[in-house]
Amino acid sequence: MEQQEHIQKLADEYYEEGRARFFDHKLEEAAMLVQNALHLYKKCDDMLKYATALNLLGVIYGATGNETMAVDYLVEGLECAIDYQLNNITTLFYNNIGSRYQELGEHEKAIDYFLKSARELQNPTCIKEERYRSWALITYLNLAVSYYCLLYTSPSPRDRQKSRMPSSA
């Protein structure tokens, strides 16, 4: 048991150091440290922290511009959260996956994920989270941004028909 506690403590240290490096914009170091934490959390069978580390890796890779790796880690984290019924953090994954699609300009896919995040925000275990309000704010702001982008970047029905409004309009 003492060995398990040591591994858990080491994983937490790697995670926190990786998080600090992320905020210092030292992204490669951050990814390496969080990867170390990820492997140790898996070894300890701490699936909540494992999923949280997957989320952070997704965010880190998104910040590096590697959207493929970002989405891969976020989807793996979402699957983990669903499989282990970590209902308090699924909204986080849906929102972060939506953000990656938003970054790629795929606003319809982004909206699908933001709407899933909004539905998860109704979950009683999610509502009890201390980060609930910030999650809700971010989800609804992201949703608004993607709707706005769709509204102003999609061709209007008039454009699709190649028609013009009368000049007097």
Image (spheres, rainbow, N blue to C red):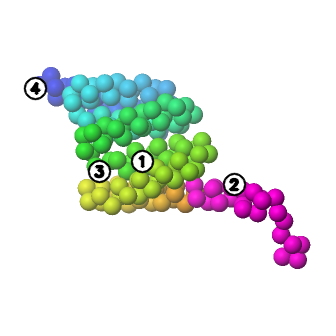
Mark closest to the chain's N terminus, 2 or 3 = 3
To which residue does mark 3 refer?
88
Q: Secondary structure at mark 1?
A: helix
**Rendered image: mark on residue 1:** 4
**Mark 2 touching mark 3, by CB under 8 A?**
no
Q: Is residue 126 above or below residue 105?
A: below
Amino acid type for the residue under numbered disc 1:
Tyr
Q: Secondary structure at mark 2?
A: helix
* Residue drawn at the location 46% of the way across and 50% of the way down: 113
Q: Which residues are magenta?
A: 146-169
Q: Is residue 85 visible?
A: yes
Mark closest to the chain's N terminus, 4 or 3 = 4
Amino acid type for the residue under numbered disc 3:
Asn
* Residue drawn at the location 54% of the way across and 44% of the way down: 101
* Most foreground residue, 1 or 125: 125
**Mark 4 touching mark 1, by CB under 8 A?**
no
To which residue does mark 2 refer?
153
Q: Is residue 139 left or right of residue 163?
A: left
Of all residues shown, which one is farthest toward the right? Answer: 167
Task: Tell me how far mark 2 sits from mark 1, CA to CA.
Answer: 24 Å
How many C-alpha atoms fall within 10 Å of the one at disc 1: few (<14), some, or many (≥20)? many
Give the number of callouts.
4
**Rendered image: mark on residue 52:** none
Q: Position of residue 45 (x, y in %)?
A: 21, 30
* Residue drawn at the location 69% of the way across and 54% of the way down: 153
* Most foreground residue, 126 or 12: 126
Figure quadrant of the N terminus: top left
* Residue drawn at the location 48% of the way across and 60% of the way down: 140
Q: Is residue 133 above or below residue 166?
A: above
To which residue does mark 1 refer?
94
Of all residues shown, which one is farthest toward the left? Answer: 1
